Image (cartoon, rainbow, N blue to C red):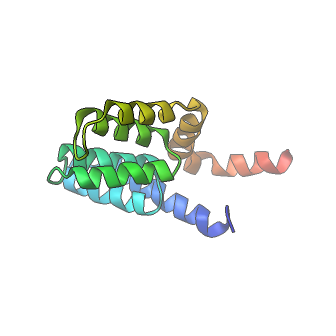
Amino acid sequence: MKGGKGELMNSNKANEYYKLALNTKDSKKRLDYLIKASNKNHKHATLLVGYAYEDGDGTSPNDELAIKYYKKAIKLNYPLGYEALGMMYQLGNGVKQSNLTAYKYYKKAKTSMADLNMLLLETYFYDEIKNEIEDSDDND
């Protein structure tokens, strides 16, 4: 059942790991938290894990793992995953260089900013205002 209590708890745990990642200066610990959040399907954390593997932040650089996480971000319907994968193709990092493939991924990245804004709202404000949201939903 989509949108059930288990999914909400999973989402809350993902946000908790994501926030812990944002608040740690140790790059290895940050990556560990981001991976935990990604395992709970946190979209932006998944993208950041890809960036970490691409750049070697908290780990050794690994283009294959970066691509894996960018593809996961895409499966999670996160348009920045397309952009990151497009850059890999444009530069030929971990894949055969192809401007045409890069163009196709960049084109797919074009999406409504509303989705990204909603993600930011949920990530940063949900825990603080969830009771108000629930009360508001009950009054609609």
Q: Residue at x 24, y 34 (%)?
A: 91
The residue drawn where x is 56% and y is 39% is 121
Which of these two is toward me, 18 or 38? 38
Residue 71 is left or right of residue 51, and the answer is: right
**Residue 28 percent location from the top left of the image:** 20, 55
Give residue 90's quadrant in the image: top left
Residue 55 at x, y percent in the picture: 20, 43
Front residue (pair 23, 43):
43
Q: Nearer the viewer, residue 137 or 96?
A: 96
Whether residue 30 is visible: no
Q: Quadrant of residue 3?
A: bottom right
Q: Nearer the viewer, residue 74 or 18?
A: 74
Residue sitting at the far left: 60
User: Number of callouts in the render?
Assistant: 0
On the image, the x and y values in percent for residue 130 come to 64, 50
Quarter placement of the C terminus: top right
Q: Position of residue 68 (x, y in %)?
A: 34, 55
Q: Residue at x 47, y 48 (%)?
A: 74
Viewport quadrant of the N terminus:
bottom right
- Residue 7 vertical position relative to residue 100 in the rendered view, above or below: below
What residue appears at the point 44 percent right and 49 percent down from the top-left corner? 73
State whether residue 97 appears in this view: yes
